[in-house]
Image: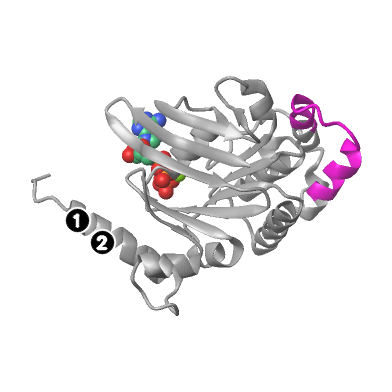
Amino acid sequence: MLKVSNLVKYYKKTLAVDDLTFEVRDGEIVGLLGPNGAGKTTILRCVTGIVQPSEGRIEIDGLDLEHNEEEVKRRIAFVPEVPTPYEMLTVIEHLRFIAMAYQTMDRFDQRAEALLRRFDLYEKRKDLVLSLSKGMKQKLAIACAFIHDASVILLDEPLIGIDPKGVHELKEMIADARGAGRSILISTHMLDTAERLCDRIIIIRGGRILAEGNLETLHEQARMRNDATLEDVFLTLTEEESTAEHSTAPL
Ligand SMILES: Nc1ncnc2c1ncn2[C@@H]1O[C@H](COP(=O)(O)OP(=O)(O)OP(=O)(O)O)[C@@H](O)[C@H]1O
Ligand SMILES: [Mg+2]
């Protein structure tokens, strides 16, 4: 279970996350939605400990990130927005390196083969990461996240650039992870996928939560009919907010 309380993040004077509180329960898939610059990546980076929050508390399975950094990080899997793999390792070496770092070498060969086959990377296992295509690198980042048994899985725009079979496999793996009681937080601009995949949606803008809940709750919060799509709800909520913020100041 992931619990984020009163998270605030400033980059110098830019307020990227503004007093945000939410949780992702065990066996739950939560979609983090919001326009460009809303703060999605910053939130995920704070949760992973890559970025130091200005204020607030991050807990995983009841353990506080600040005081139990190593144990908390061990429980997290993260697929970053822009993967930066070690290009001079081969595909299988890269996967082994990650598994070793997380001390999860049990049945490594079988698990690695299954993941690589799933993402059509098995034939490439002895090739340098350097030689992979962009989508293949994205799939390797996903395989690395799933090679260890994390209790919280964070995915930042993981569906961009991967082929339809890769998308299908990833969705299946996310659903399986939910079945195994993991907490999954996924940022995406793909609203139709979010609508189908997620148990709950959090819509943010300017680092603040605009609406949160399942589609039915979101309809109520956006004061829309219950046959409206998530796209309708998203556009209504984020437009309302941007109209309210609209300034007449010159550029
Ligand atoms: N390293 C950084 N230094 C300074 N400002 C940053 C940095 N990273 C993000 N920001 C700012 O923080 C705000 C939130 O950015 P963030 O990357 O979290 O948004 P996002 O919701 O992930 O957007 P996108 O949909 O484009 O990925 C933006 O105003 C952005 O300019
Ligand atoms: Mg982002």
Looking at the image, what colour scheme do you see? one colour
Q: Is residue 101 magenta?
A: yes
Identity of the residue drawn at 58% across and 38% down: 83
Left or right for 117, reference 59: right
- Badge 2 marks a residue whose secondary structure is helix
Q: Residue furthest top?
A: 67
Rendering coords of residue 117 (x, y %): 82, 52
Image quadrant for the N terminus?
top right
- The residue tagged 2 is 240
The kind of residue tagged 1 is Ala
Q: Is residue 83 above or below residue 247?
A: above
Left or right for 83, reference 250: right
Rendering coords of residue 90 (x, y %): 76, 33
Identity of the residue drawn at 32% across and 59% down: 238
Rendering coords of residue 168 (x, y %): 69, 62
- Res. 15 mark: none
Q: Is residue 161 visible?
A: no
Image quadrant for the C terminus?
top left
Snapshot quadrant of residue 217? bottom left
Q: Dominant secondary structure of the magenta stretch? A: helix
Near mark 2 (Cα within 10 A), the count class, few <14, some 14-19 or many ≥20, is few
Q: Which residues are magenta?
A: 96-116
Q: Is residue 22 above or below residue 128?
A: below
Residue 82 vs residue 78, the one in the foreground: 78
Residue 112 vs residue 8, the one in the foreground: 8
| Gap between marks 1 and 2 measured at Cα | 6 Å
Q: Is residue 61 visible?
A: yes
- The residue tagged 1 is 244
The kind of residue tagged 2 is Glu
Q: Is residue 79 magenta?
A: no
- Badge 1 marks a residue whose secondary structure is helix
Identity of the residue drawn at 9% across and 51% down: 248
